[in-house]
Image: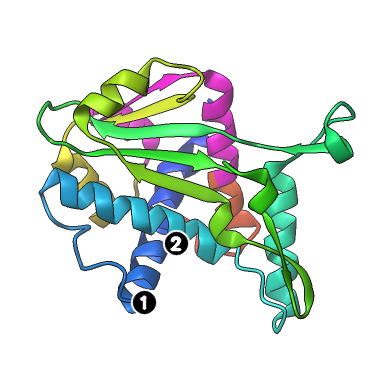
Amino acid sequence: MHAGFPCLLPNLQKTLKLGAKAATQAGELPAVLDKAQGRLLAGGMAVALRLGFGYILRDCHLDAAQAAKAHAFFEENFVILDPAAPGGRRYYQGKFLIRTSRRGDDMNVLLRFCPDPDALYIKTPFGQALNSLALVDTQVLTENQADQIENDPSQVDLVVRFKDVQSIIGLLGRSGVDIVGLLLENLVQLTGHVGHLFKLGAIATDIQLSLDLPKAA
């Protein structure tokens, strides 16, 4: 099994918690990540994922060490050298649908990396900087919208399907999260392009290794 797999869900969990903390402090998110209502949970997860990755990729000109970490993480995980692309580089644009198997949960979040490459860098008084909030786009979808795109490879590369809302809430509060264990317990199913599964696992690993997050329990 790919080395990144065991870190995927623990570090997704860490990213969600980082984003939830930042969003709550900023007044953008009520404390809904522990609620059983699917639509509320989806909205909270969408904001937490966006701000969690934004926190990891924050480019602070007043903190050279953090700026260097952000750039190194971005270059390692999202920049693809391609002589055929404009400027010789393009960006990883994986698309992931997170939802539940139980009909009626209404818990559907579409996560897209680098959806608008032109917005990835911004000009500041200190020079060019990464636009951390352009790295990730999240959308809350209805059940019908999720059904329509789930099997469309132009819109979704990988589907992360939890058993139900309670399984997601359990992930957020559970220590020692292991993707293999969750698969064996039938709490989560992963379907889609295997290359994107590898990539998501590698990104999750780098969240821990490159940015010095505490090791997953």
> Within 10 Å of the Cα at label 1, are there few (<14), some (14-19), or many (20+) other Cα atoms?
few
Q: Is residue 166 above or below residue 29?
A: above
Q: Which mark is residue 26?
A: 1
Way the structure is coloured: rainbow
Q: Find residue 102 and report its image quarter.
A: top left
* Part of the protein shown in magenta: 178-203
Q: CA distance from mark 2 to mark 1?
A: 10 Å
Instruction: Check if mark 2's residue and mark 1's residue have beta carbons within 8 Å.
Output: yes
For the point 65% across and 37% down, the residue is 92
Q: Where is mark 2, residue-wise?
A: 51
Image spot of residue 147 (x, y percent): 27, 21
The number of numbered discs placed on residues in the rendered structure image is 2
Q: Type of residue at label 1?
A: Ala
Of callouts 2 and 1, which one flags the residue occurring earlier in the amino acid sequence?
1
Q: Is residue 159 magenta?
A: no
The quadrant of the rendering that contains the C terminus is bottom left
Q: Is residue 119 left or right of residue 217?
A: right
Above or below for 193 versus 27: above
